[in-house]
Image (cartoon, grey):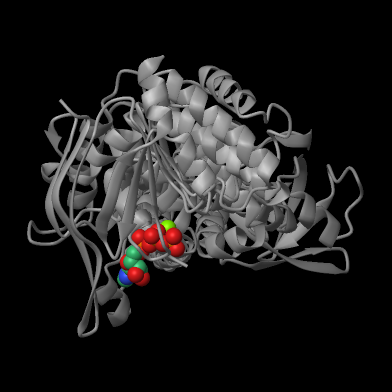
Amino acid sequence: MFFAFLESSRSALAAIFANRLRSFLTTLGIIIGVASVIAVVSVTGGMSAFIGDSFASLGANSLTIQSYTPFEDLMKGIRSRLTPADLELIEKRGEGIASITPILAANRSSQIKYGSQTAYSEIMGTTYTYQDVSQTYTEVGRFLAQSDNQTRRRIAVIGEDVRENLNLPENPINEYVEFSGEWFKIVGLLEPMGDIMGQSRDNLVLVPYATMVSILGNQARTDIGIQLSLTPTAEPDAVISQLTTLLRNAHDLSSSEDDDFRIQTAEQLMEQFDQILGTLTMVIGGIVSISLLVGGIGIMNIMLVSVTERTREIGICKAIGAKSHHILMQFLIEALLLSLLGGLVGLATGYGLGMLIANNIPDFPSASVPLWAAGLALGFSAFVGVLFGILPAAKAANLDPIDALRYE
Amino acid sequence: MSLINLTGITKHYEMGSQVVKALDGIDISVSKNDYLAFIGSSGSGKSTMLNILGCLDKPTSGQYHLNGKNVEILDQNELSEIRNLEIGFIFQSFNLLPRANALNNVMQPLIYRNIGFRQRKEMAMDALSRVGLGDRVDHLPNQLSGGQRQRVAIARALVTHPSILLADEPTGNLDSKTTIEIMQLFDELHKEGHTLIVVTHENEIAQHCHRIVEMKDGRIFNDSATEKASLGVAV
Ligand SMILES: Nc1ncnc2c1ncn2[C@@H]1O[C@H](COP(=O)(O)OP(=O)(O)OP(=O)(O)O)[C@@H](O)[C@H]1O
Ligand SMILES: [Mg+2]
């Protein structure tokens, strides 16, 4: 069987390359199917690797608390909130917490002024721990310090875009900017972080959390986010359940009411993201299986033509001793190699496309094809080849030798 | 015991309402190392006869015993094996694989015996040089002359060292010099112990053989030994 197999593969390749154009057109369905799935997977794969890295930087031992408003409430105009009081409560009563970073954002885009220049930026109140949590470091000057918070200093750390938009000098330290009618001294300039999906991450102003609270006053709308890092010995689940009880009591929730906040580990955040990507992949998978089906039918069609064309050859081979399985193998291998080659071409094309897409979106993570996706794509191509090759191959194998020999 | 034994073999083709009796009741035995020629006019059933002897075609009725085995009960794969191991077939129209060169054509039957490339090539080169075609082995059939194709076809039949050689008009379209060479080769093969069955319509060729069976309308009309046979016995 072994040498027969080798010889079948050799002559199958010879047959495929003898009809290069025909083979190419036949496998176009498979090429397109595989190329599109690989292009998408390579782009999203790069993205999820990138986002995975960002989440990893949060540390496995960290929790995020955010307010959560169910959809029905949102429709009624009710919004859940996390308040500075909640933060204080957690600071006082929370167990197993190593550090706590509040993030208080002003309205998405706030007006900020320097001299006669005006710009719009995101202004967030936070504490010194933010720099570890979000891996944001200063290029010039210093970051927010613990004392800044305690004394509610009017200082700011700004991003590169803000400096540029306000025409601030290269070294903006000790310059003053104005927002919400207050003056802030710039103490630090953040390292440029670039864009993510077309959205600049350098257009932000960080001020001490306590300062932000006092500026916003006791606005009823204040809704903060809280980032916790846990002590090495703390059990995330235990901390979550303790904080849940704490916050539920603080928010006066009866046992029939759902939580109006979400406590998530970095892992959970990542899982959520993966879920979205997974759904996307499923949808694409559906589209691709249709194109693979069409590709498979194309292969079956051309294999049937090829069996008919080579009827006499099949007769000759049978006359000199080929058994059914020899002929079956011959055509099955041909169908298999045809679709596998289509899969390979599709793989290369898809990867090229993915690179093209990723490179044309500024600062987008570069495309990468996970090994499983490449394996799966080739595996599916092979499967399609065998599946749709069986019928023509069986037809060839069952030909009567004398009839096949007489075929004109 | 005879190598080949046919009793009451018929082969009928239904052409619409008409029935063509290509073979119409054949009884014949061929013993080992026979050297036999089927002669007869065109359409008398010689090729049909050879196809049945070569286990390529099945008779409509009658019994065929090869080496004492009833061929009728064998399935296609078992028949393929017999064709591969026992029979060397030289077709009236060569029947070479058009996309394979001479060497690959001759190596082809050995693939079905699962022989490795090196040994296949060695055996095929032996067979090709035996028929005087040691060069030009990398030519495709359509790049060879009729006589050269015939030699490739013979080499392919010889390469498996079959006990029975069946040749349908092996010299049909060859010049007289090549015809003589090929018949000399057949004589040698016979001396080596092969059983040869040749279909021909040329009397000279038939005279090389030891036994001539004349066919007419699907029946055996005459079956006689030649002078060669008595010579052979005397030697
Ligand atoms: N597949 C077929 N279908 C119908 N009739 C057939 C078929 N094969 C052979 N015949 C008929 O059977 C008869 C014998 O044919 P066969 O090929 O055996 O003749 P032959 O003796 O070899 O002739 P030739 O010397 O021309 O090769 C012919 O009348 C032919 O028409
Ligand atoms: Mg004939």
Residue at (38% x, 28% y) in the render: B229
Residue at (75% x, 40% y) in the render: A191
Furthest-top residue in this view: B235
* B91 to the left or right of A361: left
Residue at (59% x, 51% y) in the render: B98
Q: Is residue B212 above or below residue B115?
A: below
Q: Is residue B81 visible?
A: yes
**Within the image, what quadrant is residue A148 found in?**
top right
> x, y (%) of residue A124?
58, 53
Furthest-left residue in this view: A256
Q: Is residue B163 above or below residue B6?
A: above
* A215 to the left or right of B138: left
- The count of marks equals 0
> x, y (%) of residue B134?
69, 26
Q: Is residue A122 above or below residue B82?
A: below
Q: Is residue A147 above or below residue A199?
A: above
Residue at (54% x, 63% y) in the render: A26
* A222 to the left or right of B75: right
In what quadrant of the picture does the N terminus of chain A appear?
A: top left
- Quarter containing ligand 2? bottom left
> x, y (%) of residue A136?
64, 38
Q: Nearer the viewer, residue A326 or A23?
A: A326
Q: Is residue A127 visible?
A: no
Q: Nearer the viewer, residue A286 or A294?
A: A294
> x, y (%) of residue A366?
66, 45
Q: Nearer the viewer, residue A22 or A250?
A: A22
Furthest-bottom residue in this view: B17
Q: Nearer the viewer, residue A286 or B123?
A: B123
